[in-house]
Image (cartoon, grey):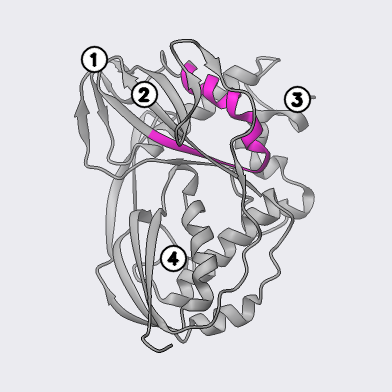
């Protein structure tokens, strides 16, 4: 499965009031802008469109309808091929001329559509983002897109570098058995359901069920199929790992919906949790999930985390 991470650097053209989590701000505006960029027939609705099966907009946003029949019948919605990764910060008033950045993560063939995505974000300049100030959203300009030290897009020259800059993520395997402590830090809210309710706790088994769902769904949709893992054995082993300490808290936050022109209340777990037990087996899975985020609303960056592990001495 191809994985690419592209850093967008932008400059505000107006004063702005952005929410605490900016990934949600971009998500809705991105969809509208992408449709405007790629829709050849200029239709308001995709229903009955002859180009639907080949449309980049449909394959990015209309994932449930575009997925093969086998995937549409699953309980779990097929995953989006993108993640907008942005830091979780306090609501901030920003001034014209201020810079901000975010990462656009692309999966599978979506990496080939990067020029269209750059054009879409560039086209968002006039529609703006964030809460309205004096009846208008705040305009911004994409100044550059980079991968590491490589410039993909330069606004000054209006050029996009040809060629693919993504890399291959192979199917995950199980790690070597080993006892130790695993510390997981959630940097954006994690929204996980347990028994059809959002959970305020995070037993290791619940975490690993989410990891397995996320990793297997992405490889099935954008890679070579479900990874050959011992799912039942992994879940059973995860149930034997204990929580050593936790500072996880449920944090509510408000998302501004451009479509509804109103605020929406969401929430999730933020903080640090440490597990103790036979966690070595799960490390390759955790490494892949770290790239892809976990839980609900991953497409606009929720469920971002980092982790560290310390083997038990002599294990």
The residue wearing badge 1 is 134
Query: Whole-Å distance between the Cαs marked 2 and 1?
Result: 22 Å
The residue wearing badge 4 is 197
| Residue nearest the viewer, comparing 91 with 146 | 146
Dot placed on the residue nearer the N-terminal end, 2 or 3:
2
Q: Residue at x 20, y 20 (%)?
A: 95
The residue wearing badge 2 is 10
Is the Cβ of the residue at disc 4 closer than 8 Å to that at disc 3? no
Dot placed on the residue nearer the N-terminal end, 2 or 1:
2
Q: Which mark is residue 232?
A: none
Label 2 residue SS: strand
Dot placed on the residue nearer the N-terminal end, 4 or 3:
3
Dot placed on the residue nearer the N-terminal end, 1 or 4:
1
The residue wearing badge 3 is 49
Neighbour class for label 2 at 10 Å: few (<14), some, many (≥20)?
many
Mark 2 against mark 1, which lies toward the viewer?
Answer: 2
What x and y, as percent, mark residue 46? 68, 27
Mark 2 against mark 3, which lies toward the viewer?
Answer: 2
- Spot the residue most to the bottom: 314
What x and y, as percent, mark residue 204? 43, 76
**Which region shows up in magenta?**
102-122
Instruction: Confirm whether the magenta stretch covers residue 113.
Output: yes
Label 3 residue SS: loop
Neighbour class for label 3 at 10 Å: few (<14), some, many (≥20)?
few
Query: Whole-Å distance between the Cαs marked 2 and 3?
Result: 34 Å
| Residue nearest the viewer, comparing 240 with 20 | 240
């Amino acid at each position: 499965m191809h994985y690419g991470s592209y850093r967008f650097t932008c400059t505000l053209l107006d004063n702005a009031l952005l929410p605490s989590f900016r990934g949600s701000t971009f998500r809705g505006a991105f969809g509208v802008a992408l449709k405007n960029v790629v829709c050849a027939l200029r239709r308001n609705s995709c229903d009955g469109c002859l180009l639907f099966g080949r449309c980049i907009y449909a394959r990015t946003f209309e994932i449930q309808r575009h997925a093969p029949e086998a995937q549409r019948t699953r309980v779990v919605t097929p995953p989006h091929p993108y993640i907008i990764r942005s830091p979780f910060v306090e609501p901030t008033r920003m001034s014209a001329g201020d810079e901000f950045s975010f990462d656009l993560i692309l999966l599978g063939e979506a990496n080939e559509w990067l020029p269209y995505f750059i054009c879409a974000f560039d086209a968002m300049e006039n529609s703006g983002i964030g809460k309205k100030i004096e009846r208008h959203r705040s305009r911004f300009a994409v100044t550059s897109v980079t991968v590491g030290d490589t410039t993909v897009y330069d606004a000054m020259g209006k050029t996009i570098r040809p060629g693919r800059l993504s890399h291959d993520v192979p199917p995950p395997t199980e790690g070597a058995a080993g006892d130790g402590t695993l510390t997981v830090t959630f940097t954006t809210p994690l929204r996980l359901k347990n028994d059809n309710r959002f959970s305020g706790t995070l037993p290791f088994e619940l975490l690993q069920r989410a990891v397995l769902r996320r990793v297997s769904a992405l490889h099935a949709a954008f890679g070579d199929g479900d990874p050959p893992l011992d799912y039942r054995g992994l879940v059973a082993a995860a149930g034997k790992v204990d929580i050593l300490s936790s500072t996880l808290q449920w944090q509510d936050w408000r998302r501004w919906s451009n479509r509804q022109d109103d605020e929406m209340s969401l929430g999730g777990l933020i903080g640090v949790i440490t597990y103790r037990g036979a966690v070595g087996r799960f490390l390759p899975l955790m490494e892949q999930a770290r790239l892809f985020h976990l839980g609900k609303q991953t497409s606009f960056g929720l469920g971002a985390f980092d982790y560290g592990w310390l083997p038990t001495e002599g294990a």
